[in-house]
Amino acid sequence: MRSEPRVIVVANRLPVTRGRGEDRAWDVSPGGLVTALMPTVRERRGAWVGWPGSAERGIRPFSHEGVSIRPVTLGDAEIRDYYHGFSNRTLWPLYHDAIRTPEFQRHWWRAYLEVNRRFARAAANTARGRDIVWVQDFHLQLVPGMLRELRPDLRIGFFLHIPFPPEELFAWLPWREEILRGLCGADVVGFQTAGDAQNFSRLARRFLDLDGTDTELHVGRRKVRVGAFPISIDFSEFDQIAARPETLARAKEIRKRLGGRKVILCVDRLDYTKGIDLRLATVEQMLDRGELDPARTVLVQVAVPSRETVQEYADLRTTVEQAVGRINGEYSQVGRVAVHYFRRNLSREELVAHYRAADVMMVTPLRDGMNLVAKEFCASRPDLGGVLVLSEFAGASRQLRRALLVNPRDIDGTATTLREALAMRRGDGRQRMAILRMMVRRHDVHVWAHEFLEALA
Ligand code: ADQ
């Protein structure tokens, strides 16, 4: 009997980072993608091709917990142009509804081409005959096409973690055909939602003059499958942490320290796509109008620092911190702060304790591929407590239909929904949460990885 083919993951970042200890040993990085894919790659004796995250040179391939690690080196100028430039200042804003204006720079594009070529070569050198290669995300959209030229014998998959924009936006890109051609090098191109998949198929048909449907494209003699594979989380991990007595005790303590008030929780990367500024504006308006009483309700915003060298991110941080300062200046008292703002990473245990302490979780991005925080919150509520307020513009809203859905740009509408969430009857909330949890449990990250690899096999 032949064994299952090996899986080679190709991603911008390696699944391991250098530890801070004296020996600088490699540790597995926290994060959903790594948790999802490491077991599969390990089981299939596979490999992971990626950038170690610094300009350090000369790192030799090595093996970590049964996974072969293949570092791709980037120089300082490449990190600036391919990563901070083309990935974070051209593609990221363009693919998120142009919430910030994308910048188009030819030298960024040249670096993107060069780095994608290096990843493709590294993947070609790593893969053996029947291996499956799974390329991840917007940093590496040219890799499937480049890899197919080098190794037409391989099965190649691609998954995009962020939204794929509609025609009116994607057409701005001076290199739109190259990107579409790069993606069409894959056998399966996966997206978070059916809408993203449809945007891609239509654009490929229009700009590359291909035949096909929304779910299948004809590229020469090959058929490319296009579809939605909504990513998820490790449900049981969150569920189990949430049920531990230590977690419950910590959640209780958090609530007590917040003065026994109703807790509105928000957890985001500090990114302009996440709608943090509009959310604070909504809460500020509610306080101004007396629709929220700071003696009875408190907002907790946990924000992880992100991409701080990019100007738009530095500006967002200033805007958010000014808003928090203004609200607290107006509405806090000694021993009773209206908005608690933490700019830091929480450990998994601490994060789950916060999820368990919340009465209302607000996840209100302006655009988001999926949004895992929404799913993590549901998985962390085995008590069926807590109400989820979720933006229609998060991919997660396609699955989590029993959340209270909002348009975050509609401040009045969001305020009304937040009031409804705070006043929701226990039975109603529990019923909604039970359905949300069932959804996340049935479609966890292991199902996601399995379904994609099945489609590719
Ligand atoms: P992100 O934009 O990073 O991911 P998201 O899906 O919400 O967004 O994932 C954020 C992760 O960071 C979550 O696992 C969350 O727990 C963690 N996190 C956030 N704040 C934290 C804090 N203060 N402390 C500790 N952990 C924190 C991109 C896309 C998303 C898509 C994912 C996966 O933008 O749309 O869902 O990839 O495909």
Image (spheres, rainbow, N blue to C red):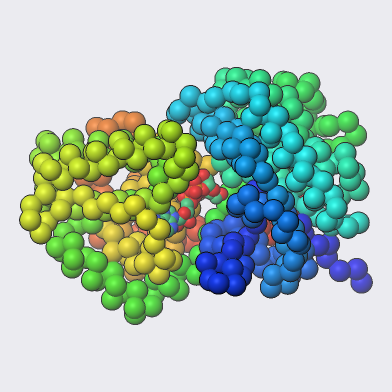
On the rendered image, what quadrant is the N terminus found in? bottom right
Q: Nearer the viewer, residue 401 or 289?
A: 289
Kindly indicate the quadrant of the structure image that contains residue 329. top left
Residue 218 showing in the rendered view? yes
> Where residue 296 appears, x then y in whole percent?
12, 54
Left or right of 126 in this view: 32: left
Residue 272's spot in the image, x, y percent?
A: 41, 37
Report the residue that reaches farthest toward the left: 334
Kindly indicate the quadrant of the structure image that contains residue 322.
top left
Quarter assignment of residue 26 = bottom right
> Residue 182 location, x and y as percent?
76, 34
Q: Give the residue drawn at x 29%, y 72%.
A: 250
Residue drawn at 14 percent across, 40 percent down: 287
Q: What residue appears at the point 83 percent right and 65 percent down from the top-left corner?
A: 4
Report if residue 445 is visible in the image: no
If the image is split into quadrants, where does the C terminus sit? bottom right
Q: Residue at x 70, y 38 (%)?
A: 141
In the rendered structure, the answer to whether residue 408 lies left or right of residue 127 reads left
Against 165, is 275 above or below?
below
